Image (cartoon, helix red, strand yellow):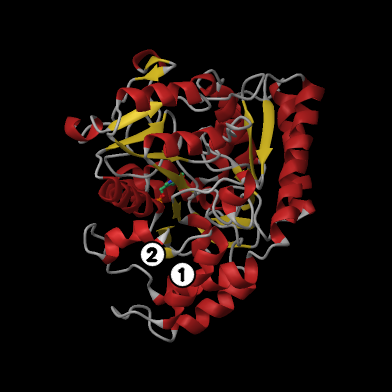
């Protein structure tokens, strides 16, 4: 049996160039990275290139990649169709500061796919949720927003509340206490964010009753994917839809992780529930930074009538919108989703068999193209249950995977694997073969 300490030694021995680059990076980039989520102990691997389902680090090591940039790369790395379209687009100007033909077509494709009458482009998921909530506040004339404990919706003040609150400080499970993420978020902002427990419709009702005529929107990830993968229980999303209708607030789907991934038409198609506003990013950009939000015309009129502000120098830039057009029209076609979902299910099934064989205190789940191993006996159904995991076991599993050439999911136990358009059965077999070896060591 190899201990975690031995695995860390092996990691250091195999990633010497990454370590040197980390030393260089840390001097100029806080934590040596450009996004907090990319760091991990003892230091991250630094990547040199990627193609298909593989990535290579600066030490020349090959990895089968199931992170796919936190799920953004549903098209896979350097998909040939994407490379061709982007190569051509790069020679035709990368910024115009004027509207152009590709953004109109890309917006139409998004509108058709997600049932949205009007769409505006942004550069990221954070911008999409920020603008969506501002429009919701403008449309309803209300200030408060309800989110779920454990949900991440990006890096702006309204939603940087109760993302990973420490259990003991987070209040009663039924009535979570809104807690800001770190310093720098004004109390006045936190006061306008209400926090409910996932899968608890009665708790949501009570909050809406206590804040009658004050709540502009309920924002949710239709499948919670910043706490692994926690699906809604049957009927929960439908109950939220009814509560929004009853209390006059808007249902905002944060489809940054589910859009063009959970199904061709995202979570609205999967759960057969219509949202009032849909926020998109990640997969729709085909690997380039692009986000969007959309709704029916009456809501988007807040922008058209200059009542709610939206603008952005890089919004709908020709390169990103070309990537979006190509991804949606030519790569992420309807046939991709059942195929990738079947591979995701094979991954979960394979993991569960291995977990059983070796008697690990873990379980695997998969929803659509995303899944994860939870380091607890049964899948959690909300944030508080998710807190009960053995996080040390995750980090051991994580380093063991990296040492054996697999990135099993995005870094950290709150993430998940993504099966992209370019993953094959061979990748699934590789991950399972490595997991079998790991599970034998960990039991
Ligand atoms: C559900 C969800 N919403 C919003 C965001 C923010 O997106 P971005 O990182 O593009 O700003 C993320 C990022 O992971 C996310 O998972």
SS type, badge 1: helix
Q: Position of residue 13 (x, y in %)?
A: 56, 40
Tell me what residue is drawn at x 44 percent, y 30 percent: 150
Q: Position of residue 5 (x, y in %)?
A: 56, 25
Q: Position of residue 210 (x, y in %)?
A: 31, 22
Q: In the depicted view, which residue is nearer to us: 280 or 405?
A: 280
Please, is residue 426 above or below residue 245 in the view? below
Q: CA distance from mark 2 to mark 1?
A: 8 Å
> Which mark sits nearer the N-terminus, 2 or 1?
1
Q: Is mark 2 within 8 Å of ligand 1?
A: no
Give me the residue at 34% from left, 42% from top: 31
| Callout 2 touching callout 1 (CB < 8 Å) | yes
51 or 289: which is nearer to us? 289
Image position, residue 262 (x, y; %):
62, 49
Q: Is residue 428 left or right of residue 104?
A: right
Q: Which residue is mark 1?
A: 107
The N terminus: image quadrant: top right
> Based on the displayed image, in which of its 4 quarters is residue 213 positioned?
top left
Q: Which residue is mark 2?
A: 121
């Amino acid at each position: 049996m190899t201990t975690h300490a031995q695995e860390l030694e092996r990691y250091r021995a195999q990633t010497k160039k990454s370590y040197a680059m980390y030393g260089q990076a840390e001097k100029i980039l806080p934590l040596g990275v450009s996004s907090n989520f990319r760091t991990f102990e003892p230091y991250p691997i630094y990547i040199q290139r990627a193609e298909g389902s593989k990535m290579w680090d600066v030490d020349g090591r090959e990895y089968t990649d199931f992170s796919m940039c936190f799920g953004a790369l549903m098209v896979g790395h350097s998909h040939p169709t994407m490379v061709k379209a982007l190569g051509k687009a790069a020679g035709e100007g990368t910024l115009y500061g004027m509207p152009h033909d590709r953004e109109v077509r890309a917006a139409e494709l998004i509108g058709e796919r997600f049932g949205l009458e009007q769409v505006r482009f942004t550069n990221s998921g954070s911008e999409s949720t920020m603008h969506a909530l501002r429009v919701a506040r403008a449309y309803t004339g209300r200030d408060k927003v309800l989110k779920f404990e454990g949900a991440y919706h990006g890096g702006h003040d309204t939603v940087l509340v109760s993302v990973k609150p420490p259990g003991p400080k987070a209040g009663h499970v039924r009535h979570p206490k809104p807690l800001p993420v770190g310093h720098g978020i004004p109390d006045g902002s936190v006061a306008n964010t209400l926090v409910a427990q996932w899968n608890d419709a009665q708790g949501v009702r009570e909050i809406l009753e206590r804040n009658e005529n004050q709540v502009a929107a309920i924002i949710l990830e239709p499948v919670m994917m910043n706490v692994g993968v926690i699906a809604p229980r049957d009927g929960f999303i439908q109950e939220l839809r009814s509560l929004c209708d009853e209390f006059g607030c808007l249902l905002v789907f944060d489809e940054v992780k589910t859009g063009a991934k959970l199904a061709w038409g995202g979570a609205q198609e999967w759960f057969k529930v219509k949202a009032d506003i849909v926020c998109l990013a990640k997969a729709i950009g085909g690997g380039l930074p692009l986000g969007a939000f959309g709704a029916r015309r009456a809501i988007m009129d807040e922008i058209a009538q200059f009542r709610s502000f939206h603008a952005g120098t890089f919004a709908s830039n020709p390169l990103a919108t070309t990537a979006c057009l190509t991804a949606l029209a030519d790569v992420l076609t309807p046939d991709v989703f059942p195929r990738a979902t079947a591979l995701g299910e094979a991954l979960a099934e394979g993991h569960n068999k291995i977990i059983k064989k070796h008697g690990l205190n873990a379980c695997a789940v998969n929803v659509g193209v995303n899944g994860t191993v939870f380091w607890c006996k049964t899948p959690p159904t909300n944030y508080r249950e998710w807190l009960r995991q053995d996080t040390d076991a995750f980090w051991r599993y994580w380093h063991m995977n990296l040492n054996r050439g697999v990135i099993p999911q995005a870094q950290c136990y709150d993430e998940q694997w993504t099966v992209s358009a370019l993953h094959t059965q061979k990748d699934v077999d590789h991950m399972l073969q490595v997991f079998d070896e790991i599970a034998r060591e960990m039991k």
